[in-house]
Image: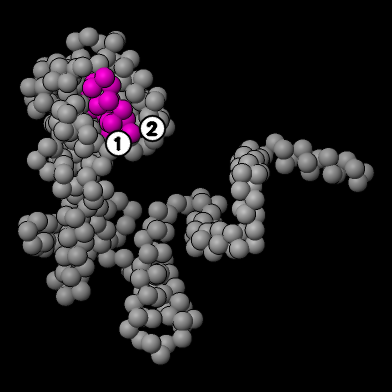
């Protein structure tokens, strides 16, 4: 009976999908230990535990949320806020015990994410609708609003990609794009080589293709690389969403003359103004309120589905091209 119970438990563990991760992790530990015996030394294990402690604590909290059927993507910002508060208290009030500073930082982080009314307004870069529409507008400008285009996305299961593609198709339905045709949507799974091969496949399958949109930095760089290798610069236009650091090479050689994303400097600038307006009671965060954001101009707080507090969008996609790529490629 006892033997049967042991076998049953082992069988259940073996069938668990997480077991594959455990096996891979164990193999990595074995290989690294063979190559470097110091890996399993007490000092190194202590350093690993110390470096991973914060992530482990946050992961446990996120796990509890997911187990109850919820989702919370604010853990990173909450952790950063708590850490900043602790650092500021210790730096500016030398007499306060470190434990007290940690408790105060914990309270601030807890209140900002949990207590009703602690959040006043949310600031985001660009709406999903604008992300989709702006990419269509960029490619349309590049090809003169005429010709065949294709989309090279990340994975078919990614909700954000699918939402952006939905709005791309919605934008393409407008009269301004009546001479443009979306001939294919393919997926590179955010893998460089697969995305590159998918781009090559588009170039081969559609000889009349004029442009490709890739709303993912990996796919966009891979597509620009394919256009470069096939010597189709100026014949095939490429745009999408990407990081300046990954696309600078292709902006300069003309394979991807212009692409979009949000400007982190402007986003930080807007956040600073929102916080200032809240602190001075000029706004409360309710939808419909308007405020001035300095060089960015006037903003209106929009309603947010499922929340009492409002939402502020930075605006349209920021366009990166040869005129500004050098200023941003070292930023992100």
Residue 203 located within the stretch drawn in magenta: no
Callout 1–callout 2 Cβ contact below 8 Å: no
Q: Residue at x 74, y 40 (%)?
A: 12
Q: Which mark, residue 217? A: 1
Residue 22 visible to an observer of this rendering? no
Residue 150 lies left or right of residue 104; in this view the side is left
Nearest the eye: 18 or 253: 253
Q: Main secondary structure of the magenta part?
A: helix
Q: CA distance from mark 1 to mark 2?
A: 8 Å
Residue 191: x percent and y percent? 40, 30
Q: Which segment did they paint magenta?
A: 212-229
Nearer to us in this view, 174 or 279: 279
Tag 2 residue: 190
Residue 257 image-quadrant placement: top left
State the SS at label 1.
Answer: helix
Compared to residue 229, the image places residue 53 above or below, namely below
> Residue 98 at x, y = what percent?
46, 81
Query: In percent of the image, x 39 and y 25: which residue is there?
Result: 193
- For disc 1, the neighbor class at 10 Å (few under 14, some 14 to 19, many from 20) is many
């Amino acid at each position: 009976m006892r033997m049967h119970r042991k076998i049953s438990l082992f069988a259940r563990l073996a069938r668990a999908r997480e077991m594959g991760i455990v096996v891979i992790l164990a193999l990595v530990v074995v290989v690294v230990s063979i190559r470097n015996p110091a890996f399993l030394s007490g000092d190194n294990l202590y350093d690993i535990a110390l470096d991973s402690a914060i992530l482990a604590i946050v992961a446990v909290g996120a796990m509890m949320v997911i187990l109850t059927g919820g989702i919370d993507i604010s853990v990173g910002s909450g952790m950063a806020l708590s850490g900043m508060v602790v650092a500021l208290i210790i730096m500016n009030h030398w007499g306060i015990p470190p434990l007290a500073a940690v408790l105060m930082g914990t309270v601030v982080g807890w209140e900002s994410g949990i207590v009703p009314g602690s959040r006043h307004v949310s600031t985001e870069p660009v709406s999903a609708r604008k992300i989709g529409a702006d990419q269509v507008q960029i490619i349309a400008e590049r090809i003169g609003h005429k010709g065949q285009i294709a989309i090279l996305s990340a994975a078919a299961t990614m909700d954000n990609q699918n939402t952006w593609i939905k709005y791309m198709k919605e934008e393409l339905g407008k009269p301004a794009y009546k001479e443009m045709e979306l001939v294919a949507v393919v997926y590179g799974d955010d893998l460089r080589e697969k995305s590159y091969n998918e781009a090559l496949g588009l170039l081969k399958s559609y000889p009349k293709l004029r442009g490709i949109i890739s709303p993912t930095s990996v796919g966009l760089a891979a597509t620009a690389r394919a256009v470069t290798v096939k010597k189709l610069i100026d014949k095939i236009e490429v745009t999408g969403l990407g990081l300046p650091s990954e696309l600078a090479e292709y902006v300069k050689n003309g394979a991807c003359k212009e692409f979009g994303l949000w400007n982190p400097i402007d986003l930080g600038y807007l956040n600073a103004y929102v916080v200032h307006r809240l602190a001075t009671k000029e706004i409360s965060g309710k939808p419909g309120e308007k405020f001035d954001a300095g060089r960015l101009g006037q903003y209106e707080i929009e309603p947010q589905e499922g929340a009492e507090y409002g939402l502020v969008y930075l605006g349209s996609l920021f366009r990166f091209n040869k005129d500004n790529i050098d200023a941003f490629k070292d930023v992100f």
